[in-house]
Structure formats: C-alpha cells, structure tokens
Amino acid sequence: MTVVDIAKELIFFDTSGPPAREKPCAEWIRDYLVDLGVDAEIQVVAPDRANVIAKIGAGKGPGLVLSGHIDVVLAGELDDWKVSGPFDPVVRNGKLYGRGACDMKGSDAALIQAATELSKEDFKRQLTLVFTAGEDTGGWFVNRILEEGKVTPEEARFGVIPEPSMMEIVRCHKASGGATVLILGKAAHSSRPEMGVNAILNSACLLDEMVKLQERLDEVVHPLLGPSTIKPTMMKGGLKGNIIPPSAEVSMNARLIPRHEGNEAIAGWMEDVIARCVARDPEFKAEVVKARGGRALDVPEDSEGVVLLKEILGTEPVGVPYYTEAVSYTTAGIPTVICGPGSIDQAHTSDEYISLEQLDRGVGVFKELIRRVCL
Ligand SMILES: [Zn+2]
C-alpha cells in the first residue's frame, strides 16, 4: 500500500464526533501493523473508542514516540462537500480530499508508511507509534496511555506529533484558561435607583480595567507566541426590567504564554482588577468565582527533538496558537514537539484536503527521524 492508500482506508472510517467511534479504525491500524510484523495493540478507552499503541524494537532503550490522533471533527453540511464525500476520499489535482485528510489521517498514514518501510531494519532503539482517540472530539484519551504507563520516558526520549504544520517545527504553544467574576450590587425598584447598587453599571468599571490589564500583558512578549491575552467573552446579569440588578457575571477566556500558565496567574490578575475597581469606587464589590489556566507547551530550543528536526529540515522552530497533545507527553516527561504535513488552514473545513507532495514530504522526514534516533 502507498501512503495515499493508507490515508484513504483511514478516512473511510467515520470517526467524526462527538460521538467519535474510533475503535474500528483503531482495529484496522492494529491489524495492518501486525500483518507487517509490528507489535501493536489497541487500548479500549470507552464503548466504541480505542487508542492504538505499536512498538518496534521494544525494550531496546529509549527512542522516539510518533503520535497522531484518529478522531476527526464533524463533517458539517454535506452540501458543502463539493469534491468528495467526507468519508469517501478522492485524489484530484495532486490533493487527497476527505474529512481528516489534513487533520490528521494523512499524517497518521505518513507515520505508518515511514515506520513500516523501515520495520525490517535492525532497530537499536525503540520506536513507538501511537494513534489516539478523542483529541478533537472530547475525551483526550492520550492521558489514558500515559497514566497507564503504556508509553514512558524509558521508552521514548522525545516525541513528535504530526498536527498539520506544513512540516514546520512547532516547539511551543499557548495554554488556554478562563475566569468568571461575580459583581455584587443591591436590588431596588428601578423607580428608586438611589436605594440600590447597580451591578450591571458597575461591570463597566471591571470591563475598563480588563482593557488596562490587557495593555499591561501586551508588554510581556514571548519570542514565538507574543503576549498572553484575556478577553471578556460572556456576560449575564439582572432579574427584571424594573429592578436595579443585584448581580452581574462576566466570564473571560484567556490564552496564556508559558510564564503565565496555571491557575495562580489568572486568579491574581482578577483579584488585582477587582482591587483597582475598589480603589476607583469603594462601594464596588465583586468576587472571583472561577480562575483556571492550563499548561502551555514550551520545549526548549536545545532539546533533542528540536535540534534533530532543525538538522533534517533546515528551518527554525515556530509557535502556534492551537493546543495539542504535546502538552500531555511533555508533562509526562517526554518532551514533544509538533511537525506534520498539510496546512492547519485546511483542518476542520469542508472539502478538507492534503497535498500529495506534503504527504510524501512527511513520510521522508519521519523516515529520516526514525533512522537517526532508532537505527
Ligand atoms: Zn489535529
């Protein structure tokens, strides 16, 4: 089979979701690898859902983990698919079309092709291939693999996730986070506004301070990611048209650079914003209901994966705005970067495609990487 044949086989399986049903696709990958003599198993993580874990040269010392996901986002309106059906892939004008062609069954196929072309070689270090469920569709089942010790730092010194990056080396991305602030007022009949405290009006002060907070954050720039951002994205408040509102709630969404990740930074910002509002108006009352920040990815410039990929590709690493499973691997002690064929511009779109040129490039680069680390 060629890389295109494998990609087509994977696209035929409707693993879109929620609810994604990856198990038949996972079984196909396992069977294909086993037929070629590779040690592969599936890990069932929920009804109809499974990861695949495959190892070549198992036990020969820590090598490399290459990890793709096999779920895809929903196809959306079928009428918007003009070139192919979402699960009926076709090749046209040097491009493979279908749901997941780009994100990321094309990449999965490139990993499979690269590994199987080399599978008969004498592996001196272990190559681990992983295909996960629930990356784009809920579940984040990569964590089950890591929690259950199915892939460990003793097996993999570093990892690569082939999310579509046009084969750019991505060594960092932001964390996501959020906060909710409850502004407290006092109810009164709207004919006697002086008897109440208007929480909705007071939210204006909070919003104004949020603008100023962003201005301060804009001064702390990560070289590849820019500044952290925090923006109000939802608001609710009030009881009735003729009542001065006793409360209002503002929710923010944040994208955090590495030095601002975790819950503390964001909680601190919100407390500070409230303190600034109180300084402006001693009657202002609010509390932080929720403050949460996830983990960013920041694999060092001189880590093995980055250095090797730089040698192979001859390009400098970049940062991206989207979030990936690389954080889970890196947190588990396997520093993991992103480098995969295809453009993120085609991910999650109708008429999703990947160019055959990118697919071949992916196979070539992954083979070279496996050669350098494992052979
Ligand atoms: Zn993806």
Image: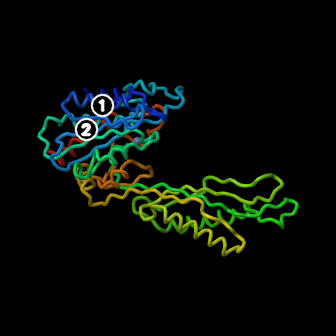
| Viewer-closest of 364 and 43 | 43
The secondary structure type at the circle numbered 2 is: strand
Report the quarter where the C terminus lies.
top left
Contact flag, marks 2 and 1 (Cβ < 8 Å): yes
**Residue at the left extreme of this rendering:** 122
Residue 14 percent coordinates (x, y): 43, 28
Ligand 1, by image quadrant, is: top left
Toward the viewer: 130 or 172?
130
Viewer-closest of 48 and 72: 48
Q: Specify the quadrant of the image occupied by residue 104.
A: top left
Q: Which mark is residue 54?
A: 2
Query: What kind of element bears circle 1?
Result: helix
Label 2 Cα neighbours within 10 Å, binned few <14 / some 14-19 / many ≥20: many
Q: What's the image's color scheme?
A: rainbow
Q: Which mark is residue 29?
A: 1
The residue lying at 49 percent from left, 31 percent from top is 75
Q: Is residue 308 visible?
A: yes
Label 1 crowd (10 A; few <14 / some 14-19 / many >=20): many
Quadrant assignment for the N terminus:
top left
Q: From the top left corner, tell me how far across and down residue 48 is, in percent.
A: 41, 31
Q: Quadrant of residue 215?
A: bottom right
Q: Amino acid at mark 2?
A: Ala
Amino acid identity at mark 1: Ile
Q: Is residue 204 left or right of residue 114?
A: right
